[in-house]
Image (tube, grey):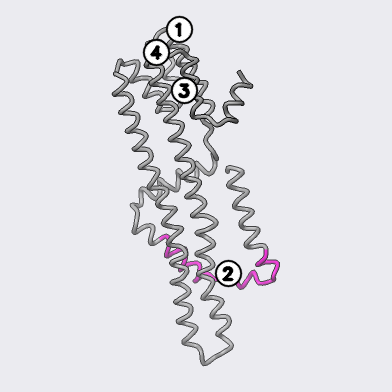
Amino acid sequence: MDMGTLSGIFLGLFLIIGPIVAGGSGGSFVDIPSAAVTLGGTISAILITFPLEKIKAVFNVTKKILKAGNLDISPWYSVVVEMATVARRDGVLALEEKIPNIEDEFLKRGLQMMVDGNPPESVKAILEKEIEAMEDRHIIGHSIWKSQGAYAPAFGMIGTLVGLVNMLQNLDDPSKIGSGMAVALLTTFYGAFYANLFCIPIQGKLEARTEEEVKLKQMLLSGILSIHAGDSPKIVGEKLKVFLSPDERLKLENTA
């Protein structure tokens, strides 16, 4: 898993669970019915809100992204500049031999359309639609995690209300009021814990990854159109540098 994500999870668990255990009350924070109401209710609401297939797909993609970490777009700068060099030296049709070796399907598709003789306006329109379609798919994933972040505290509050009702029914026994209140509040704790340590941060991680992928595709699109226009490799490179951070530009200059 990405070290930043892993470190954040462990730090959050340490800062929340550590004081509980240190206070000698770890056992009182474990209540299976409370956890079932909070997590079970959240899962039920998600299943009602979203199609099952999309939920499965989102969790599979989330797992891959959390393992991979941030997306580094700088290596693609060199790939596009290399394609521009080949096109400038040997002609656009020479790219056809290079296309099968390209790993990125977006870049591969754009170059193939260019080699096939499609006008730049058509290439741009099609690839921009592909970027929009990708964003729409990713929004579903963001929504699933965002919804969990909203549902978990809500079901935690529902569990708390259920616990309070049960507690009020036993007011004739004062010895049970304290323990009943503690159990009632646990569902709120579980909901806030799950939402703020997992759901909302993962939603933010996915949104950041979407921004990175959109930025990469926009950079590749700029490079494809620049090659199509017959620009020199140097001009293509300058256009691509717009999408790189100052640190990434400096790194490229040092390796040049």
Majority secondary structure of magenta residues: helix
Position of the C terminus, as image quadrant, is top right
Q: Give the camera-side residue of 93 and 208.
A: 208
Q: CA distance from mark 3 to mark 4?
A: 13 Å
Which residue is labeled 2 in the image? Answer: 30
Q: Residue farthest to the top? A: 90
- Disc 4 residue type (three-letter): Gly
| Sequence-first tag of 4 and 2 | 2
Element on which disc 2 rests: loop
Residue annotated with mark 1? 89
Mark 2 closeness class: few <14, some 14–19, many ≥20 residues within 10 Å: few
Q: Which residue is mark 3?
A: 239
Q: What is the CA distance from the residue labelled 2 to the residue labelled 1?
A: 69 Å
First in sequence: mark 2 vs mark 1: 2
Residue at label 4? 230
Q: Mark 1 or mark 4: name the one nearer the start of the chain.
A: 1
Q: Earlier in the sequence, mark 2 or mark 3?
A: 2
* Segment colored magenta: 19-43
Amino acid type shown at disc 2 = Val
Spatial separation of the CA atoms under disc 1 and disc 4: 11 Å
